[in-house]
Amino acid sequence: MLRALENNWRETAWVLASQVISLSGSLALVRLLTGALSPDDYGTLGLALTIATLGNVALFGPLAAGVSRYFAVAIELGAINSLLQTAGRLFVTLLAILSLFSLPIAPIAAAADLAISPTLVLCAILLAGASGASFLSISVRNAERNRRAAAIQVATEMAVKLIACSAM
């Protein structure tokens, strides 16, 4: 019983560390970007990030939730490889759907005299794909109860974002 409580505290500490890293990194990113970009550029970035956020919330989030939900069942049935392969195929399909709906944004924006270039839209789609893949991977780590690996992945992802934005 005592060992189980110790494991729960350890897992809780890793989850808490992951959340603190994510929150503090996000605040640092906002500070970095607002200092580095003009108000117009920051607004354009916000529009592009809407595509990435929409992809994660509407497409990749539910996929990750489904994988988390059925992970234990797949382990029990010996079908974990099948679950992960299916999730991979669904991920590619969802990324294609996001691309099909997002690519027309640049010409529509140009017609409305908005500063959203095709390159910006493509970058937003790539960011959505990278974020979605990371979210799916973190969800698998959490389903495996490997909170340490999930926290390390969150920290690594945040470090990459901070380094990339610092290089701007």
Image: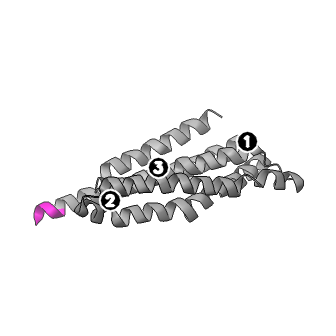
Question: Where is residue 144 drawn, in percent x and y?
Answer: 29, 56
Question: Where is residue 57 drawn, in percent x and y?
Answer: 56, 63
Q: Earlier in the sequence, mark 3 or mark 2?
A: 3
Q: Secondary structure at mark 3?
A: helix
Q: Is residue 136 visible?
A: yes
Which residue carries the number 1 mark? 119
What's the residue at 28%, 63% (across, down)? Answer: 72
Q: Secondary structure at mark 1?
A: helix
What colouring style does the render use? one colour
Residue type pointed to by label 2: Ala
Q: Is residue 20 visible?
A: no
Label 1 neighbour load within 10 Å: few <14, some 14-19, many 20+: few
Give the magenta range. Answer: 1-5
Q: Nearer the viewer, residue 119 or 114?
A: 119
Question: Where is residue 46 drawn, in percent x and y?
Answer: 70, 54
Residue at the limit of the structure toward the top, as seen here: 167
Question: Where is residue 119 drawn, in percent x and y?
Answer: 73, 42
Which residue carries the number 2 mark? 143
What's the residue at 34%, 65% (across, down)? Answer: 70
Residue 134's disc number? 3
| Residue 32 placement: quadrant | top right
Label 3 neighbour load within 10 Å: few <14, some 14-19, many 20+: some
- Type of secondary structure dominating the magenta stretch: helix
Task: Tell me if residue 10 is in the magenta stretch.
Answer: no
Q: Nearer the viewer, residue 1 or 129?
A: 129
What's the residue at 82%, 54% (across, down)? Answer: 109
Residue type pointed to by label 1: Thr
Against 24, residue 69 (above or below) is: below
